[in-house]
Image: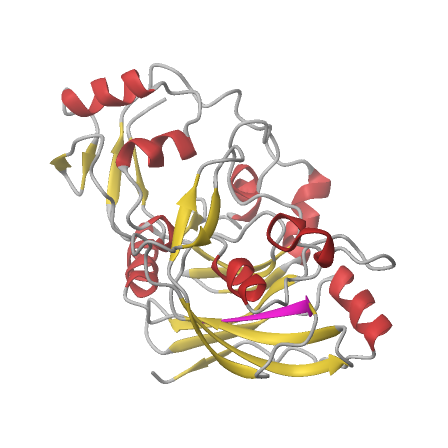
Amino acid sequence: MSVESRIVAADEAEIRLDRWFRRHFPGLTQGAIERLCRTGQVRVDGKRAAAATRLAAGQAVRIPPLPVGPSPPPPKPNQEDARALAARILYRDEAVLVLDKPAGLPVQGGPGIARHLDGMLDALRDGAAERPRLVHRLDRDTAGVLVLARTVAAAARLAASFRGREVVKTYWAVVVGRPVPPSGRIDLPLVRTQGARFGRTAPATDGSGVSAVTIYRTLDHAGKRFAWLELTPRTGRTHQLRVHCASLGTPILGDATYGGDQAVPAGFPATLHLFARALSFPHPEGGRLVIEAPLPPHFAETFRLLGFAAPQPASPARVPR
């Protein structure tokens, strides 16, 4: 492995450097990470950094040849994967590539994850010298709009936009129950807890949590049993929308982790019904790019069962800022 540089994604802000390394290179031990930092082989924005350093979105992490790799690298994408990814391109130009990520596909690797989007990005080069770069993430079970940078410069500018909260994110969710009031602002600080392999997110009750704000409104409902919500997160905390919907007493359909049995009623798909419908963000070369994704198949089936009618996604538009 040669020396490389990776940009810290917006949703990785405030993570410790050692935890960032374990997320990207799960084969590394804590001791190896601390040794690389202590000897100056790992640098952040060109400067030496301790293992406990908190990262900021948009920073560049220098990755030296590693003593232990992350587990065998995934095979190059096969023709079937390459065709499937190409069919999911919503927008492409010289700087930006936007995909409609399917539910169930992890964005990055980790323990027990051999097939993930990051391992397939060479299939999206389209003749370019550089492979596309991730600048933000979606959870494995969340479908929808995902932005990739096609150059290092575009990656830095996009990461800065996510860090500076210049990106407007619009999610759709089907929830079990009907929130009261039907629209509003959820201002509920969150904290990461131990438990599952990667921990969980919970409401903070002792003042130790980080700020988390979500704007929601009900777009339609099926009596009091289900509702279709539009969610606009003003912050980007792990599992924020899932915890905030559960805090209203209306967990996201299919989200047994935060909604328990209430979230998995009989007769409905058990897949998480959270969908990144749209993004509006500053284009690295000027203007704003507005992108919408179509309903994923499990959403479309649930909408059919509940009688919800969703508009078709608008065509991609690059508009003045």
Residue 293 visible at all: no
Secondary structure mainly formed by the magenta segment: strand
Q: Which residues are magenta?
A: 169-175
Q: Residue furthest front?
A: 206
Which residue does the image show at 70% across and 75% down from the upper left? 227
- The image quadrant of residue 145 is bottom right
Residue 58, horizontal then vertical, whole percent = 27, 53
Which residue does the image show at 53% across and 45% down from the upper left? 107
- The image quadrant of residue 154 is bottom left
Q: Is residue 126 magenta?
A: no
On the rendered structure, is 54 left or right of 171?
left
Q: Is residue 167 above or below residue 67?
A: below
On the rendered structure, is 201 left or right of 7?
right
Residue 184, horizontal then vertical, whole percent = 49, 81
Q: Pick the residue in front: 181 or 92.
A: 181
Q: Is residue 196 above or below residue 156?
A: above
On the rendered structure, is 91 left or right of 207?
right
Q: Pick the residue in front: 262 or 175.
A: 262
Residue 288 visible at all: yes
- The image quadrant of residue 250 is bottom right
